[in-house]
Image: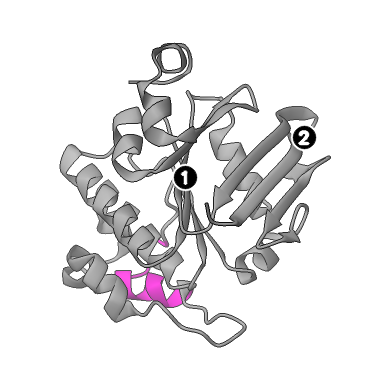
Amino acid sequence: MSAPALRISGLDAFYGAAQALFGLDLEVPEGSVTVLLGRNGAGKSTTLKAVMGLVDCGAGRVEVAGTDVAGWPVYRVSRLGVGYVPEDRRVFAGLSVAENLVVGTRARPDARVTWTDERVFALFPKLAELRDRTAGQLSGGEQQMLTIARTLMGNPDIVLLDEPSEGLAPVIVQQIAETVAALSGQGLTVLLSEQNVRFASRVADRAAVIERGRILVSGDMAEIAADPAVRDAYLTP
């Protein structure tokens, strides 16, 4: 197994005085597609936000390539090579598709540039057709593609995907699944949160089940999805 690209150890996270994560432990091997599974309110999105520096962290560590980033501001985590695709997409509605990509463009500190607009348009041909359309005029699925593409323009090593299949038509979900596979094929490490086990089984090789802010079990995706006790108690079919 590859060394962890991301390791979370004993992490507590808070929204004000309300604690959302309790001593959470999670490892994401380099080059893997790892899914954080659980029902609404289990702590999936909070875990991704904690990695990105979007929620307050108490005790514990969040190690990106061996560097503890717990408590860092978002821009510093991003500069270390972490890209974040939020559940609510947050496109710049008044800017065109091409302008959204420009906003997300950032070379790494080592000047390495992996993703360009040509490459993301090859990954999302539909966006190439819509490059001059304002983002606010796009469908939900098209906005999801744009948000992923904009994140890639930051040339990350790790991509955090929050509920990528939520609320999308089946044909778009299929395209998102193909996108995740393509990212893995490019050598990126992917951590996604999902409650759709069928979708997760199509894209992930590893899984961790979270409930009430704690990891209950982790391991091979196929084995976890096939465990009736885990599936029936904690997962949405």
Q: Give neighbour class at mark 2: few <14, some 14-19, many 20+ (Cα, 10 Å).
A: few
Relative depth, front residue between 109 and 106: 109
Q: Give neighbour class at mark 1: few <14, some 14-19, many 20+ (Cα, 10 Å).
A: many
Q: Looking at this rendering, what residue extends furthest in the bottom direction?
A: 111
In this picture, residue 38 sits left or right of residue 149: right
Query: Quick check: 185 above or below 47?
Result: below
Q: Position of residue 118 (x, y in %)?
A: 28, 80
Residue found at x 42% / y 40%: 163
Residue at the disc numbered 2? 16
User: Do the CB atoms of the residues marked 2 and 1 lie less than 8 Å apart?
Assistant: no
Residue found at x 65% / y 27%: 213
What's drawn in magenta, residue-wise? 92-103
Query: Quick check: 72 above or below 177?
Result: below
Residue found at x 39% / y 13%: 228
Residue 55 seen in the current view: no
Q: Quadrant of residue 135?
A: bottom left
Label for residue 34? 1
Residue found at x 80% / y 42%: 60
Amino acid type for the residue under numbered disc 1: Thr
Quarter of the image that includes the C terminus? top left
In this picture, residue 208 sits left or right of residue 145: right
